[in-house]
């Protein structure tokens, strides 16, 4: 009750047949409403979800706040301040750094592999080259501008699938400019693979760490490992998300409940969970306490 899920993939994201979700937004939003959720943040790997805002306003008129975003993959313009400014002007609440379009995702064998298997003209060697740092590890000017715009427009900024080294550079710059809405996206995922000590360092700089359902789904990381890391960095710097993705998965509110339940069973308290799913996401979306 009162939870906000900051990582919900839209249904129609890549294709009318591939990578579809179990339910379209106007069908699962009433489920989130019945569960007592406060807000969801829609994400798309391909096109800015902000363009769905006016359509969903007509299809769903319930109390769950529907926030939208832009992911800075090549199809949305890449790591370009103009893409951020335009999304903000259309009402976006968040920016995601590149996912399949990041050099980090390519190096880690991340999500771009699934796209390469599904689309004839998707060429990772041509597309997955985006980095936010130079050869010396310093943030590129465009990344500085994206951070500045996020701070000025009150947007959440997620690190997406960039490497943990890039996430660290972003966290250092965010701390320097006083930006307090940076999220290190699923640090234990295949796409990122961050060591625990790096997560500690990034959180110490003022960022939040995200842990999503796929991290602890069968065959992935141990829930006990996730609980141990959350305890070490503090629930006050943690968010829990569904990362709603895949046709076989339940709706976002059900996935978030499953994640909370698994972590509760492995030692997190109800108070820690509420901090991670109610208090912190509300701050990141700019919602009243």
Image (cartoon, rainbow, N blue to C red):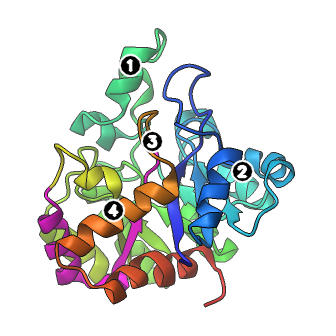
Task: Label 4: state its secondary structure.
Answer: helix
Q: Residue furthest right?
A: 58
Q: Say which residue label 2 marks.
A: 50
Quarter holding residue 37: bottom right
Residue numbers of the magenta segment: 222-245
Q: Say which residue label 1 marks.
A: 116
Q: Say which residue label 4 marks.
A: 259
Quarter holding residue 210: bottom left
Q: Say which residue label 3 marks.
A: 245
Q: CA distance from mark 1 to mark 3?
A: 18 Å
Q: CA distance from mark 2 to mark 3?
A: 18 Å
Is the residue 147 above or below the residue 116 in the image? below
Q: Residue at x 84, y 51 (%)?
A: 54
Q: CA distance from mark 4 to mark 2?
A: 26 Å
Q: Earlier in the sequence, mark 1 or mark 4?
A: 1
Q: Position of residue 176 (x, y in %)?
A: 42, 82
Question: Taking 128 as reference, is 65 left or right?
Answer: right
Is the residue 250 above or below the residue 11 in the image? below
Q: Position of residue 223 (x, y in %)?
A: 17, 63
């Amino acid at each position: 009750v009162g939870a906000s899920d900051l990582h919900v993939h839209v249904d129609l994201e890549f294709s009318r047949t591939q990578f579809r979700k179990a339910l379209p937004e106007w069908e699962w939003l009433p489920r989130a409403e019945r569960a007592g959720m406060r807000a969801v943040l829609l994400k798309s790997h391909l096109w800015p979800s902000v363009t769905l805002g006016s359509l969903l306003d007509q299809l769903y008129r319930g109390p769950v706040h529907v926030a939208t975003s832009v992911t800075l993959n090549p199809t949305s313009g890449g790591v370009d301040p103009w893409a951020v400014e335009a999304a903000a002007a259309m009402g976006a609440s968040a920016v995601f750094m590149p996912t399949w379009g990041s050099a980090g995702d390519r190096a880690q064998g991340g999500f771009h592999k699934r796209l390469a298997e599904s689309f004839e003209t998707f060429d990772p060697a041509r597309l997955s080259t985006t980095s936010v740092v130079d050869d010396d590890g310093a943030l590129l000017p465009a990344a500085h501008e994206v951070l500045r715009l996020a701070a000025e427009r009150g947007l959440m900024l997620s690190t997406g699938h960039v490497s943990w080294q890039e996430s660290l550079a972003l966290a250092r710059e965010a701390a320097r400019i006083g930006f307090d809405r940076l999220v290190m996206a699923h640090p234990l995922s295949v796409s990122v693979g961050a060591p625990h000590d790096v997560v500690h360092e990034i959180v110490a700089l003022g960022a939040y760490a995200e842990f999503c359902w796929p991290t602890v789904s069968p065959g992935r990381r141990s829930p006990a490992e996730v609980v141990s890391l959350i305890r070490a960095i503090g629930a006050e710097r943690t968010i829990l998300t569904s990362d709603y993705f895949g046709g076989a998965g339940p709706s976002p509110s059900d996935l978030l409940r499953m994640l909370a339940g698994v972590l509760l069973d492995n030692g997190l308290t109800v108070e820690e969970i509420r901090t991670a799913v109610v208090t912190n996401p509300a701050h990141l979306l700019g919602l009243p306490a």
